[in-house]
Image (cartoon, rainbow, N blue to C red):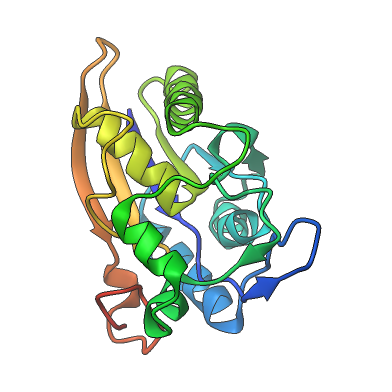
Amino acid sequence: MELMLIRHALPVRRELDSGVADPELSPDGTAQARLLAGYLGSEWIDAVYASPLRRARQTAEPLAAARGLDVVTVAGVAEWDQFSPEYVPVEELKAANDPRWQQLLEGVWSVDGESRQEFAERIVGTVEGIIAAHRGQRVAVVCHGGVIGSYLAHVLGLGAEAKPFFYPNYTSIHRVAAATTGERSVVTINETSHLRGSGLPMGLFQEG
């Protein structure tokens, strides 16, 4: 089967004193999600899954609607910061040279209640469960940068403690071929042709 791990589109910035930030998509993010759905319009997709966080669900909705599918929410692919009271796009952290940007570069793990190993185990277990349920099909899972990095690190044998080895752009597609015999092969990383020439933000290192 073919697994497509898709990072969510650009959300708004949200910083709260308490509670969970869980931001919605920005106007640019909504446009990115529409372009993603159009780009994948020629490909048959059997199921669309999404993290329960709003930025992932809202990114998945245009894609699912174009296929007449429901978005299946799966908690196991939520991001490591799912309960955080703040969400600041990493581009803004970098531009301000925020200490949180340096932590990301250094791979510092600052999550209460879930270790890096536990996060990796949750992600791999959930994704493998989706693969097992869709033999011979093509499935999209709209999730988060940390989730994508963790699963690809697993496929590449880098281990749960590996520092991030690439930056997933907004609405980037990462394809994995998953054989019933257990082999996993990375087919593409950071596929973002749909954002080229759009003028929309793509991520840290590229512009649309």
Quarter of the picture holding the C terminus? bottom left
* 175 left or right of 77 in image: left
Whether residue 38 is visible to the viewer of this picture, yes or no, is no
User: Residue 199 location, x and y as percent?
Assistant: 36, 89
Residue 9 screen position, x and y as percent:
50, 67
Q: Is residue 4 above or below residue 88?
A: above
Give the residue at x 45% y 28%: 127
Find the residue positioned furthest to the bottom: 199
Q: Nearer the viewer, residue 160 or 174?
A: 160
**Of residues 25 and 150, the one drawn nearer to the viewer in this rendering:** 150
Q: Is residue 112 above or below residue 9?
A: above
- Number of numbered discs overlaid on the protein picture: 0
Left or right: where 101 falls relative to 114: left
Which quadrant of the figure has residue 48? Answer: top right
**Residue at 43% of width from left, 84% of height from top?**
96
Image location of residue 113, percent across then percent down: 63, 33
Residue 172 lies in quadrant: bottom left
The location of residue 185, given as percent across then percent down, is 19, 31
Q: Nearer the viewer, residue 123 or 105?
A: 105
Q: Is residue 141 visible?
A: yes
Q: Eyeballing the image, is 80 above or below 40? A: above
Q: Residue at x 33, y 71 (%)?
A: 194
Quadrant occupied by the N terminus: top left
Residue found farthest to the top: 181
User: What residue do we see at 39% from left, 20% from top?
Assistant: 135
User: In the figure, is residue 195 to the left or right of 189?
Assistant: right
